[in-house]
Image (cartoon, rainbow, N blue to C red):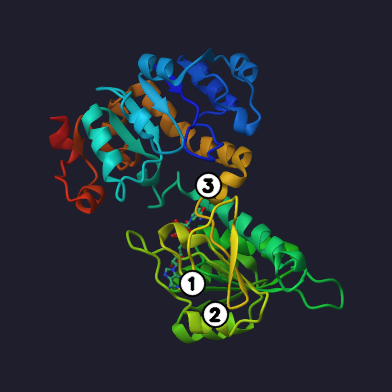
Amino acid sequence: MKVGVPKEIKTHEYRVGLTPGAVREYVAAGHSVMVEMNAGAGIGATDDNYRKAGAMIVDSAREVFASSDMIVKVKEPQPSEWTQLREMQILFTYLHLAPDPEQAKGLLKSGCTAIAYETVTDAQGGLPLLAPMSEVAGRLAIEAAGAALKRYSGGRGLLIGGVPGVQPARIVVIGGGVVGTHAARMAVGLGAEVTILDRSIPRLRELDELFEGRVRTRFSTIEAVEEEVFVADVVIGAVLVPGASAPKLVSRDMLSSMRKGSVIVDVAIDQGGCFETSRPTTHADPTYEVDGVIHYCVANMPGAVPLTSSQALNNATLPFGLALANRGFSAVLENLHLRAGLNVYRGRLTYRAVAESLGLPFSPIDQAAA
Ligand SMILES: NC(=O)c1ccc[n+]([C@@H]2O[C@H](COP(=O)([O-])OP(=O)(O)OC[C@H]3O[C@@H](n4cnc5c(N)ncnc54)[C@H](O)[C@@H]3O)[C@@H](O)[C@H]2O)c1
């Protein structure tokens, strides 16, 4: 198959659909890979690195779109990209179509086959192409908190791990899923005192075993959140209720009980955030203050570390991308997990939740492909 990798054009997006390492795997499997000039610049991968991996470098995205059977990207296609997609072409990338009717219309009109990273599943019922970005965001959350706690950033002037004889920071993580676990892992590693709250008792049991007594776990109720927030130096918001906006678990009243210079990192901001006072920020201006509490609410945290994020994403997408390259659309019909990723097929919406959110007709894949 001819596989194409255009340079990402969304503002401040530095990741790349295929790293040179991933290109080597496609080429070794007998595929040809065309990469737009400078596509890897954001992760320090030169055109020569791609050439050595076996890719052909072309001058423009137009050439990539015109000549490829499958386009592999990171972010959802922008208007200038979806107009270049065509019937029978496979698009493999993050789409997040539910809140984006314009993109949905563009993809439907193009006739392409669009597989969304975020809805591909695995045998454990997880979302394997979302998890790596949650791992990155969780780990980054503690770095962000550490930076915001510094006095010159408006924080309390506290070192997360303290030093011998001096109390470390108290870090409360609300939501013990992928983000929460990776945040806790970093915080524990730095020597912080860590508490994780979750609504799932089986999950709290797993965390208790995983951390072998090095974190406190607590069932998440309004009272528990209030008590923990009151004594915290840092609160990480990491909840997810699948298919719904994040619940507002920390009210403004609770926030005002926190010590001045404390920090909240609302990782769940991409689902609306779990603090009443959260609003999305960017890497250019990541924090703001409410009632003396520093808020960090960057909606695309993994974008800060595109090298790590691209590698983690490529590790996860590679087996699925190779299956698509080897088998074409048949891979979608044969593999239940790839099938779960199919959102658009030749002018029809094949993912029920997306169709319902957009108020458009849903076509089950068997009907759409018939
Ligand atoms: N800002 C970013 O750049 C970025 C990056 C990656 C992920 N995220 C977001 O981070 C959030 C968490 O993602 P994840 O992959 O860890 O999800 P996950 O499903 O692995 O974990 C979510 C956890 O929240 C728990 N939960 C649900 N309701 C709760 C409540 N009331 N109190 C306490 N816990 C509760 C669940 O039981 C689950 O364990 C999501 O909103 C995701 O979109 C943001």
> Which quarter of the image is occupied by the C terminus?
top left
Find disc 2 in the rendering and name its residue.
255
Q: Where is residue 204 in the image (x, y as percent from the top left)?
A: 51, 71
Disc 3, SS: helix
Residue located 66% across and 79% down the image:
260
For disc 3, the marked residue is 132
Q: Would you say the residues marked 1 and 2 are in contact, meaning their CB atoms lie under 8 Å apart?
A: yes
Q: Distance between the residues labelled 3 and 1?
A: 27 Å
Counting labels gives: 3
Structural distance between the alpha carbons of marks 1 and 2:
8 Å
Tell which circle, 1 or 2, labels the residue nearer the N-terminal end: 2
Q: Where is residue 317 in the image (x, y as percent from the top left)?
A: 47, 36
What residue is at 70 percent from the left and 63 percent from the top?
Answer: 146
Quadrant of the image occupied by residue 80 = top left
State the residue at coordinates (41%, 52%): 126
Neighbor class of circle 2 (other Cα within 10 Å; few <14, some 14-19, many 20+) is many
Residue 3: percent from the left, percent from the top?
43, 20
Q: Mark 1 points at which residue?
A: 277
Residue with the most extreme right position: 164
Amino acid carrying mark 1 in the image:
Thr
Other residues around mark 3 within 10 Å, as few (<14) / some (14–19) / many (≥20) = many
Amino acid carrying mark 2 in the image: Leu
On the rendered image, what quadrant is the N terminus found in?
Answer: top left
For the residues bearing labels 2 and 3, Cβ distance under 8 angstroms: no
Residue at mark 2 to residue at mark 3: CA–CA distance: 30 Å
Q: What element carries label 2?
A: helix
Q: Which of 145 and 214 is in front in this view?
A: 145
